[in-house]
């Protein structure tokens, strides 16, 4: 087991990729703080799954878009499960709109959760590591859209592009503290964030034709990468992003 004796906090882990990461970490021996914004029953289900694997777990309500709550989230997590070793900034949202119609409120919502949330939860986590004089690992759930333009999703692309630079910058600044910061860039993964796409067969087929491995990713595909990055196997990685996208990003062929 790669994560025995470790304690991890995963934001937005009541469903989707966050849930898969939480359960996989538990299977690798970690205790896990599950955080949720608005689905306590789902979070409780994830906690039960983790406990059934013999690990400790607790669900903590946290809207990461409200930066002022970040210190409280980390304090509560530490009070419940003890010192933390691993943070996964997974919570994320997207809102579709042509650029000329993007409402300020939607722009703020996306940037607040995807970028500002990750920034200030990481800040609170790093303060905790400094106070307890311990090393740690931060994993930012980015997207292929930290590189790949996505028309009609400009705020989402901005948030992930900035998250990439947060990963690189903090990796350098925090290296002297023994804190590694890396990112994961999933391609198209079958989760609730893609509910509309999953129901639209025409769009889904068009997307699959762009993916060299010719399938959507599953949350477990991303959880395995997260478990690697959280483990000692990745001790010499920092400031990098692992793309887990079935080949989508670099797909090019001449027909
Ligand atoms: N599914 C994909 O195709 C895909 C691709 C690339 C990147 N990602 C990224 O992976 C991450 C997880 O996405 P997912 O596909 O599992 O989506 P999802 O919608 O299933 O899960 C997102 C999670 O974030 C939580 N969340 C949303 N707003 C929050 C807030 N204000 N505070 C706290 N939690 C909040 C939700 O409750 C949910 O648990 C996101 O950062 C997303 O951008 C997903």
Image (tube, rainbow, N blue to C red):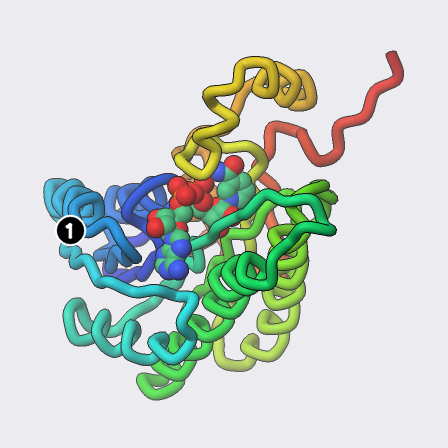
| Helix, strand or loop status at disc 1 | loop
Compare residues 159 and 127 and report the one nearer the observer: 159
Name which quarter of the figure residue 247 lies in. Answer: top right
Location of residue 98 with respect to 86 vertically, above or below: above
- Residue under pointer 1: 55
Residue furthest to the bottom: 131
Residue for point 31% across, 61% down: 9
Compare residues 89 and 152 and report the one nearer the observer: 152
Residue 76, position as x, y percentages in the image? 21, 74
Residue 29, position as x, y percentages in the image? 24, 50
Residue 88, position as x, y percentages in the image? 41, 58
Name which quarter of the figure residue 38 lies in. Answer: bottom left
Residue for point 88% across, 17% down: 254
Residue for point 46% across, 20% down: 199
Residue for point 24% across, 47% down: 26
Q: How many marks?
A: 1
Give the left or right position of residue 213, taking residue 14 as reference. Answer: right
Location of residue 181 with respect to 1 vertically, above or below: below
Give the left or right position of residue 109, taking residue 15 as reference. Answer: right
Compare residues 80 and 113 and report the one nearer the observer: 113
């Amino acid at each position: 087991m790669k994560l025995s004796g470790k304690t991890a906090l995963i934001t937005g882990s009541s469903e989707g990729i966050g849930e898969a990461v939480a359960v996989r970490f538990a299977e690798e021996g970690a205790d896990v703080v599950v955080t949720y914004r608005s689905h306590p029953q789902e979070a409780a289900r994830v906690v039960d799954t983790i406990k059934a694997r013999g690990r400790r777990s607790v669900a903590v309500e946290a809207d990461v878009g409200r930066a002022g709550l970040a210190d409280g989230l980390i304090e509560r997590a530490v009070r419940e499960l003890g010192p933390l070793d691993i943070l996964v900034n997974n919570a994320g949202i997207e809102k579709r709109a042509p650029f000329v119609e993007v409402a300020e409120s939607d722009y703020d919502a996306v940037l607040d959760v995807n970028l500002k949330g990750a920034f200030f939860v990481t800040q609170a986590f790093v303060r905790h590591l400094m106070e307890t004089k311990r090393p740690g690992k931060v994993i930012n759930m980015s997207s292929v859209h930290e590189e790949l333009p996505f028309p009609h999703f400009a705020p989402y692309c901005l948030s992930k592009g900035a998250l990439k630079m947060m990963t690189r910058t903090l990796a350098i600044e925090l290296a002297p503290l023994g804190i590694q910061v890396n990112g994961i860039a999933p391609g198209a993964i079958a989760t609730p964030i893609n509910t509309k796409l999953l129901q639209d067969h025409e769009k889904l087929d068009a997307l699959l034709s762009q993916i060299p491995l010719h399938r959507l990713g599953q949350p477990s595909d991303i959880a395995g990468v997260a478990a690697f990055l959280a483990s000692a196997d990745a001790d010499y990685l920092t400031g990098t992003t692992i793309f887990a996208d079935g080949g989508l990003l670099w797909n090019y062929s001449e027909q």
